[in-house]
Amino acid sequence: MKSALLPILVIAAAIAGYAGLHAAAPEPEQDTTPARPISVFTATVRAEETRLTVHTQGEVRAATELDLVAQVGGRIVAVAQEFTEGGRIAAGETLLEIEDTDYRLALSEARAVVAEADVRVQQALADADVARQQLRNEPGASPLARKQPQLAEAHALLEAANARLEQAELNLERTRVHLPFDGRLLSTQVNVGQYVTPGTPLGRAFATSRVEVRLPLSDDQLAALDLPIGFTAETGQELPVTFEATVAGKRHQWQGRLLRLDAALDPGSRMLYAMAEVQDPYASGASAEGMPLAAGLFVEATIPGRELEAALLIPPAALRPGNKVHVLDDDGRLATRDVEVLSRSATRVVVGRGLRTGEQVIVSAIRNPVQGMALAAIAEPENG
């Protein structure tokens, strides 16, 4: 029995000895050294008189497009050299010709009918004059005796003949298809030898006199422009719009103007759309390098907004997700602010509320920022 208890007593004694030694060991010293401040770059909030700018984007589209449709039937006997996709067409220039022999014959026949009807009117006038002379002493004579219905019939026949003549002239004119404006062809659907009937699609064209760009605006952007929903600019008072895009590897600019705002928000995006235009985009309205503002091009747009006497400006790097800004307070600690962003660009952010002039905003990245953490400003970078 004693031999069985001996190992247990040895283990118990060892545990007790270890516990005694551990209890007698000195406590480790606490590290009371303050946390080293994190070095950050800062920029000073400054107040300046400035004009807000709105940056948006949209797709260029032709202001006027036209479906070319045959108005008379016949075989196509000729097409212009420019009657092809992308072809440049002047207003009134003949695009294609439909065989006109039948229409010329119809015109000659209509002219003959008019001449015949005119003779009948002259005869009816003479008959009515004779009847008036013969019946001048018979005041009760009937209109028929006075040849009045016959004269009215002759006039009606002449009027109908003139209408048919006008229609014949119009049909002959319609054998020559042309555009009512200077434009370009988007597509063509017929060629020489093809027979067409009234209503046959011939092609599609657009006017080159101007193009439009539909620009989405958020509520903040609308406030920056200080324009009401449904705004329409007075002639000569349109806001300038600068469009930019990269074409063929080069950056180009075009100058346009804002014409109006929609009267209702888009139900899908909840955005309000503005309509801007560029006049003569293929000639005088082209970029300085001669690049036209072609339909289908996606462009960035810059619109000047309202002026502010003392706007608060900060670098774009100071603005954090969710319109937040990290500030280095007077105690050298981090403070996070919610700010109202009025306008932003690649070089600056215009702030309405949330900051004060002269405060230091942090423009460098901070890993795991914590409110109140110690910071140290090491330099202030150049503020664009």
Image (tube, grey):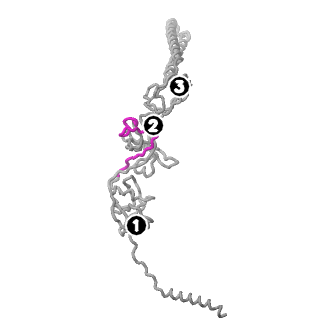
Which comes before the other along the chain, label 3 or label 1? 3
Q: Residue under label 1, please give it.
A: 334
- Based on the picture, tell me whether residue 175 belongs to the magenta stretch: no
The residue sitting at 49% across, 21% down in the picture is: 173
When the figure is inspected, residue 53 is found, relative to residue 124, above or below; the finding is below
| Quarter-of-image position of residue 246 | top left
Task: Tell me the distance, in whole angstroms, between the alpha carbons under discs 2 and 3.
Answer: 24 Å
Q: Amino acid at mark 2?
A: Ala
Residue 159 visible = no
Q: Main secondary structure of the magenta part?
A: loop
Q: Residue furthest top?
A: 134
Nearer mark to the viewer, of 2 and 1: 1
Q: Amino acid at mark 3?
A: Gln
| Quarter-of-image position of residue 230 | top left
Judge the density around disc 2: few (<14), some (14-19), many (≥20) Cα neighbours within 10 Å: some
Judge the density around disc 1: few (<14), some (14-19), many (≥20) Cα neighbours within 10 Å: many
Residue segment shown in magenta: 280-307
The residue sitting at 41% across, 49% down in the picture is: 55
Mark 3, secondary structure of its residue: loop
Q: Residue under label 2, please give it.
A: 63
Residue 301, image x, y percentages:
41, 46
Q: What mark, if any, has residue 71 been given in the picture?
A: 3
Residue 180, image x, y percentages:
45, 28
Q: Is residue 54 left or right of residue 194?
A: left
Task: Tell me the distance, in whole angstroms, between the alpha carbons under discs 3 and 1.
Answer: 76 Å
Q: Is residue 300 left or right of residue 158?
A: left
Say which quadrant the C terminus sits in.
bottom left
Residue 370 visible = yes
Labelled pair 2, 1 in contact (Cβ < 8 Å): no
Which comes before the other along the chain, label 2 or label 3? 2
